[in-house]
Amino acid sequence: MDGMAIVWFKRDLRLRDHEPLAHAAASGLPVLFLYLDEPSQCAHPDYDQRHRSFVMQSLAAMAHELKEAGHILQVIRAEAVPFFTRIREKIPRLQLYSHEETGHHLSYRRDREVKALCRACGIPWIESQSNAVVRGLTHRESWNEQWADRMLGPQAHVPLSSVIPALLPISLAHEWPAADPACESTSAAMQPGGEPSGHRYLDTFLQERVEGYGRAISRPQESRRSCSRLSPYLAWGNLSLRQVCQATLLARSRRRHVRQIDLFTARLHWHCHFVQKFESECDMEFNNLNSGYDDTRNEVHERLVKAWEDGLTGVPLVDACMRCLRETGYLNFRMRSMLVSFLAHHLWQPWQAGVHHLARQFLDYDPGIHYPQFQMQAGTTGVNTIRLYNPYKQAEEHDPGGQFIRKWVPELQSLPLPFVYRPDRMTPLDQRFHNFTLGADYPAPVVDVDKAAAHAREHLWKTKRSDAVRSENSRIIRRHVKPSRVPRRDSQ
Ligand SMILES: Cc1cc2nc3c(=O)[nH]c(=O)nc-3n(C[C@H](O)[C@H](O)[C@H](O)COP(=O)(O)OP(=O)(O)OC[C@H]3O[C@@H](n4cnc5c(N)ncnc54)[C@H](O)[C@@H]3O)c2cc1C
């Protein structure tokens, strides 16, 4: 074979608004559509079967569409460097096209190794910008303007019929099983992967569901319908942020639900704002963004972390959220924040003790959002307001009838309202009356929430005022905040 352009799909599992595909098609070379199912990436502690299912469903949808246009999607289980080394031996004139990935340490290391290989072998690797995230950025001057330009820019579509198909030599090709067991969703309650599903969620949101957006955003039950639920489609690239922004602008022009749409648009902006933080400071995966917090919360209590992970803390809303997440892969922003606040503040655990667990639970896990958000909610950035969410108060405010708790913590199903929030407040007589035993039917709280919050508040505010935190703050603001702005609160 004379030459080949490879489109290497990573977290961009779509065939529309795909710049690498457009560039590969424009090269005039036959184009190979490639996904590498990399064992090392799948073994990372942030990875779960639910992610795999979502990816496989996305690939199945792409394979189907490509087949109709006379192409084959190659899904190959291999590590990137050995694979590209082998293919380079068989095909002399190779070009590689992909999106830039703001991934974790392991994927970044893989990219560096692929880059070194490409340099050594003379393979041009053309990487396109992902959404509005800028590689190599050292400050935020004009970042907002760049975001807007990028979102309003033309989408990169290419008719598949105009692309010349390429095939791998037989020794490198693998027959991808059409009925991969991983395509079966791990739970019927999990959102299905794939570009068509992403567009369905986008359409139903902008046509009807957006109406309740502002009202429902903080509520664990109502948010499931009235938030967009687009996050897994953005995280795995079934949709580009530009597609979502442009569809949103079009919906806004119809002058219905304008306020709700504006609220939603602000969140779309946050998407890249957070990924940009991680892109610019990827150490955040391991270390406190503000090193002034390095001496707080260093001891891990396995028993407490396990109770949190298992949804058995004895604090009903915390447990309901964790169990719901385990089954469905989704939780709204406020409840995610509360879970982290409970781990880091009430249980007084280092955020690192829970960051992988939640990554595995979130179907929409995206390292670029996950790590900066986790640190912000754990209060280790220094520049954001420290938020301690009282899980009892959150339950009263955002689960007013207690339905969410009752649904996910069936042990509390038959208790009347105040006790659904606070089973620990039942007297022995109440317990006998309701045929319920605290400690046997449902755990007593693993911590005294009020005392734990007071302890956390005292320590965190003291540390926030320390010289170590303050001097780091200037560095953080210089790098991650637009110079003309005072630090934002970045939270809902
Ligand atoms: C500890 C923690 C970890 C998180 N980890 C992730 C993650 O791994 N992946 C992820 O996509 N989101 C993450 N988020 C952000 C947020 O909770 C989800 O994006 C949101 O709940 C997804 O639901 P939705 O699509 O219905 O959101 P909508 O409210 O409909 O918002 C639309 C889109 O805007 C973006 N967005 C919304 N809120 C935020 C936010 N606070 N920060 C950044 N982007 C936002 C998302 O892409 C979202 O899909 C995390 C939040 C916290 C507190």
Image (spheres, grey):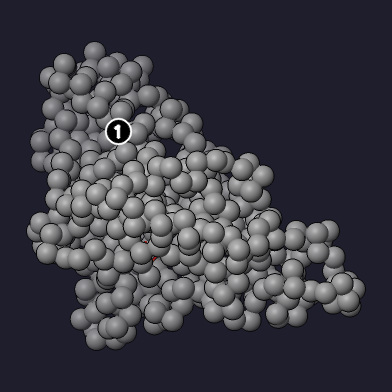
Ligand 1 visible in quadrant: bottom left
Q: Residue at x 37, y 44 (%)?
A: 288
Specify the quadrant of the image occupied by residue 402. Answer: bottom right
The answer to whether residue 37 is above or below residue 87 is below
Of the pair 418 and 248, the residue shown nearer to us: 418
Q: Amino acid at mark 1?
A: Tyr
Across the whole image, how many numbered discs are drawn on residues?
Answer: 1
Q: Quarter of the image for the C terminus: give it.
A: bottom left
Q: Could you tell me residue 283's position as x and y percent?
A: 32, 38
Q: Quadrant of the N terminus?
A: top left
Count neighbours of disc 1 (C-alpha within 10 A) and say few if under 14, some if 14 to 19, many if 20 or more. some
Residue at the spot 54% in from the left edge and 64% down from the top edge: 454
* Kind of element beneath mark 1: helix
* Residue at (44, 81) in percent of width and height: 215
The image quadrant that residue 301 belongs to is top right
- Residue extending farthest to the top is 89
Confirm if mark 1 falls within 8 A of ligand 1.
no
Q: Is residue 152 left or right of residue 50?
A: left
Q: Residue at x 50, y 46 (%)?
A: 297
The one of 171 and 374 positioned closer to us in this rendering: 374
Residue 70 picture location, percent across and down: 29, 40
Residue 82 in view here = yes
Which residue is under mark 1?
108
Please name whichever residue, 285 or 17, is drawn nearer the observer in this view of the structure. Answer: 285
Q: Decide: is 105 above or below 416.
A: above
Give residue 478's position: percent from left, percent from top.
17, 52
Say whether residue 356 is visible: no
Location of residue 131 in the rendering, given as x and y in whole percent from the top left corner: 22, 53
Q: In screen coordinates, is 409 left or right of 205?
A: right
Identify the image quadrant of residue 206.
bottom left
